[in-house]
Image: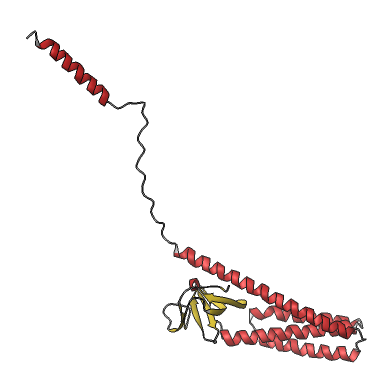
Amino acid sequence: MRQRGPGIALLALVLAACAANSAPDPSAPAAAPPVAAPTAMPRDSALERRAARLELRLAERDAQVADLQARLDEAREEIVRTLAKLQTVASRAEAASAMAEAEIAVQGLRAAAGTQANGAAEVGQAGTLLQQASTAFGQQNYGGALYLANETKRVAGIGRTRLAGAGSERGSLRPGEVAFAVAVPLQAVARGKIREGPGSTYRVVFTVEPGAVLTGYSYVDQWVRVADESGHAGWMFVTLVGRRG
């Protein structure tokens, strides 16, 4: 029995050392938790539609800027022609005749515009020019009256032409339909269906391929009224159209 004492003591020391080595070190840093694999974010269809609508409004603004630039160029040409006339003294009769023609043009523009909000700009501008022509005529500035009367006729003519073209393409507005201030140059960004009305339940009248040239006239919610180069018109979903490059 005395021979087993040292062996048992040695075995106890070995077991104690193993237990000390297997115990966790409190000073050691904790293991980092496992990192989850990144998951794909779901596409926000509502955000895409909103972005498409904003892109459409930006296209409308670009078209308005182009339209205003075209009007400015026409005004400059008219001023050059009028200045050539002003080198001679304009007669009272000539100015009076031009003012009478301008008044008839304004009346025709008002009749064409009716209750259309998109014709109010030309009606107001033409009316202001006609009033200025009357003031100049009363001050015996017949050259100025002649120039302003010609400007009135020019503005009224542009307005009537635009309203007539817009009406033939757009037809009467639907409830909730918002007309663009000017025709907006667009193109198809994907193959899309053109429908009879603003909704997926309406009949498909024709389809367009990516890059097809379109012109936008109005919109209702997420649908845009467009026409192609052949004059065929219908409604297209807003995410399928974009600004024409």
Rendered position, 145 above or below 23: below
Q: In which quarter of the image is residue 146?
A: bottom right
Q: Residue furthest top?
A: 2
Q: As drawn, is 27 to the left or to the right of 104? A: left
Q: Which residue occupies the foreground of this view, 112 or 40? A: 40
What's the residue at 48%, 65% (across, down)?
Answer: 48
Quarter of the picture holding the C terminus: bottom right
Q: Can residue 83 be seen in this view?
A: yes
Rendered position, 43 above or below 149: above
Q: As drawn, is 65 to the left or to the right of 82? A: left
Q: Which colour style is shown?
A: secondary structure
Quarter of the picture holding the N terminus: top left
Q: Where is residue 29 in the image (x, y as percent from the top left)?
A: 37, 31
Q: Where is residue 198 in the image (x, y as percent from the top left)?
A: 48, 78
Q: Which residue occupies the foreground of this view, 155 or 28? A: 28
Q: Which residue occupies the foreground of this view, 38 or 235? A: 38
Q: As drawn, is 54 to the left or to the right of 123? A: left
Q: Where is residue 199 in the image (x, y as percent from the top left)?
A: 45, 77
Q: Quadrant of residue 144?
A: bottom right
Q: Where is residue 69 in the image (x, y as percent from the top left)?
A: 71, 75
What's the residue at 13%, 14% (across, down)?
Answer: 8
Q: Quadrant of residue 125?
A: bottom right
Q: Is residue 128 visible?
A: no
Rendered position, 196 above or below 19: below
Rendered position, 2 above or below 57: above
What's the residue at 86%, 89% (across, down)?
Answer: 96
Q: Which residue occupies the foreground of this view, 213 or 50? A: 213
